[in-house]
Amino acid sequence: MKYSPQSDVHRTEGRKLFSRKNNMLTNHDSNRNRNMSRTDEGKESETNEDKQKNEVRDAFTTKGIIPPKINDFLWKLCHNRHKTGTWFLKIKGWEDKAYCKCGELETMNHIIMECPLNQGPTIWNYMKNEWKRNFPKTQWLHPTIELIRGLGSIQLRKSPKWMSEAYIERITEALWQIWTIRNNRIFNKREISAELATKMIKRTLQFKKETEWTYITKIKETSHRDKKTLKKKWGKSMNKD
């Protein structure tokens, strides 16, 4: 095979091309690794953000005490996510939906605390009397929107933990009852009388009591103290009106 100067040129060009491809692959791998590290950092930051959100959520809700559906309701209440009142004022042609049938602007405060059509005053009055029967030595804290927003962090003064839990459970069940009555009135065209609303909240508390009692009695590790606490928590709730 004869020597040709062109062959050296081809070999040189081939080496340059090979080294260029190697550099490209190396750069690609380094960029890929850099992007992967950024992604991992992003995932870590997202998990940290999720943890912070969960901590904020747990600040006004109590896991194990409040049912998930009511937890969701409270979260929306705290973040103004319920589509009521002023939310409809922003939509052209739907401004009339912002007002309650009684004529007032349908804010969450009006729905929960004030509106007689939702039987809020009736239900809160029943809860107050029911509390006084069960805990005559402990003052009833009349709920407000501000109190409800921080419901999970409530601790009654000079009272055991279970009494604070009893208060939280009663408030959340009353809230959900009022919200249900309001939705039935608007979407199902069903009006609820004060007498029926009282019977509904009474049945709700009875069901809550029976559910907790069934759960506690099925756990083998449950102590006599836990059962005694539950009886204190709900004992006189359904004996009288």
Image: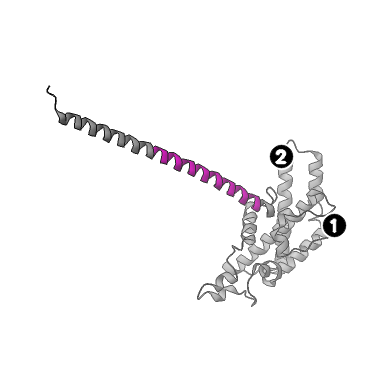
Which residue is more in the foreground, 166 or 91? 91
Query: Chief secondary structure of the magenta span?
Result: helix
Give the residue pinned by disc 2.
218
Identify the element where label 2 is drawn: helix
Q: Percent x, y for residue 230?
A: 78, 47
Which residue is more in the foreground, 42 or 99? 42
Q: Percent x, y for residue 61?
A: 68, 53
Residue under the point 76% across and 38% down: 222
**In the displayed structure image, the side of residue 120 where residue 128 appears, left or right:** right
Q: Is residue 64 magenta?
A: no
**In the displayed structure image, the side of residue 23 where residue 44 appears, left or right:** right
Q: Is residue 30 magenta?
A: yes
Q: Quadrant of residue 179?
A: bottom right
Q: Quadrant of residue 5?
A: top left
Q: Percent x, y for residue 167?
A: 77, 55
Quarter of the image where the N terminus is located: top left
